[in-house]
Amino acid sequence: MSWQLRPYIAPDFTEKTFIDAPEAVLREAPRDGVAPAGFHAMSIFPEYFKIGGRWLLAEESRMDCVAVYEGGKIHVREFRLLKQGDLVVTGRTERCEEGVYVHADGFREPSEQRDVFAFRRSRSRETAFSRDYDELYEVLRHDREHGKIVWVMGPAFAFDFDARAAFAKLVEAGYVHALLAGNALATHDLEAAYLRTALGQNIYTQKSQPNGHYNHLDTINQVKLRGGIPQFIEAEGISDGIIYSCEKYRVPYVLAGSIRDDGPLPPVYGNAYEAQDRMRDQIRGATTVLCMATMLHSIAVGNMTPSYRVLPDGTVRQVYFYCVDISEFTVNKLSDRGSLSAKGIVTNVQDFIVTLRKGLGL
């Protein structure tokens, strides 16, 4: 039997609990950027709100935001985007007591039967991930044609010749629909394409080059001189790498700045909230998300990614979320921050991407 998405089992709204539930209470936002007292904060799960006798699903959700009733639908908004007078759902119970229902088991995740005492329950560098890879191959093959695959990447990829080549192959083969990263990933990838180094070390031999610590700064400077990344690629004859492949195959990428950025490159968003908005633009349609070697970006994206997606035909499907990092702390941190649906793979991300390329037959 071929692999299939796990079906979504919607709540049975004919049950007495739902029929007898009160209407959700809506209160106006008292001013711009401020929610009314008792506001309901969203989770990563599908949530339904009883309004006008109907149970309405929030179709685009995000953790730690609020539900706004507008135009007969539920819209989920960040606090900073609230406008005075917005009708915000209130209530802090989750089982219909206040007209709010959080559906945490819609995909019927399989549960393991475990002894009270057992070894190796957490995900660590000792965990065997063969089954996770097998699932990931199937997920990626499915979503290449029927979904949106978003990659969230730290700069570690750009430090290795084989990793850059492997990811470029994934872009070429259609397994990358958007890329979220910071200044460093793009800078060192372009440095690698331009000068064959990353932070001054040869990307293949890993040997430090004379005055190599200037190389990333020279790269940024040259990109600015040329007027931007596309112009730099053309003028300098760049023909390989992650950013080059994204430009060639028109894959959108969002580069979010940080307080420690060098330069930065021209496309980097220096305003944190503008960067967050552009990242969320890409996450809104994501059906598979892979976060690799970047703790802060992974947590940020994890917090804005729900566990489900409502497709144009009204179908509700699962969002697959993977966090890949050599650090167990980073992998487990996502669950600590509420991204409970994230699946962790503890490994070197450079090895991971090369293995993934081979497993996909590229």
Image (cartoon, helix red, strand yellow):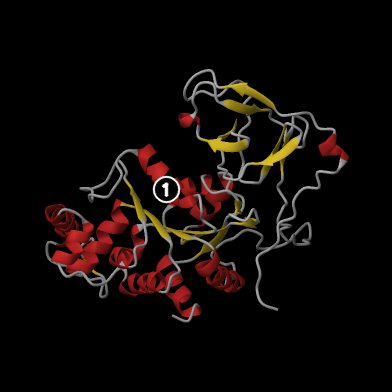
Q: Residue 103 at what x, y percent from top left?
A: 72, 45
Give the residue type that dot 1 points to. Met
Q: Identify the residue at horizontal 66%, vertical 60% (top origin).
A: 121
Location of mark 1 (residue):
279
Residue at the far right: name it. 16
Pick the quarter of the image with the C terminus.
Answer: bottom left
Relative to 16, 217 lies left or right: left
Residue 132 locus on image (x, y percent): 59, 69
Q: Quadrant of the N terminus?
A: bottom right
Residue 84 in sight from this viewpoint? yes
- Look at the picture and state if 106 lies above or below 99: below
Q: Would residue 208 be seen by someone viewing this image from the given angle?
A: no
Task: Please rate how many residues cluster around mark 1, counting C-alpha atoms within 10 Å: few if below 14, some from 14 to 19, many from 20.
Answer: many
Q: Position of residue 129 (x, y in %)?
A: 58, 70
Q: Circle 1 — which element?
A: helix
Height in image: 311 above or below 54? below
Marks counted in the figure total 1
Question: Which residue appears at 88% of the width and 39% of the height?
Answer: 16
The answer to whether residue 225 is left or right of residue 204 is left
Residue nearer the viewer, 128 or 98: 98
- Residue 128 lies, in percent from the top left, at 59, 71
Q: Nearer the viewer, residue 144 or 351?
A: 144
User: Where on the picture, by quarter, is residue 185?
Assistant: bottom left
Q: Residue furthest front?
A: 71
Left or right, 259 with respect to 84, comes to left
Residue at x 17%, y 56% (from the top left corner) = 223
- Outermost top residue: 30
Q: Is residue 189 above or below residue 338?
A: below
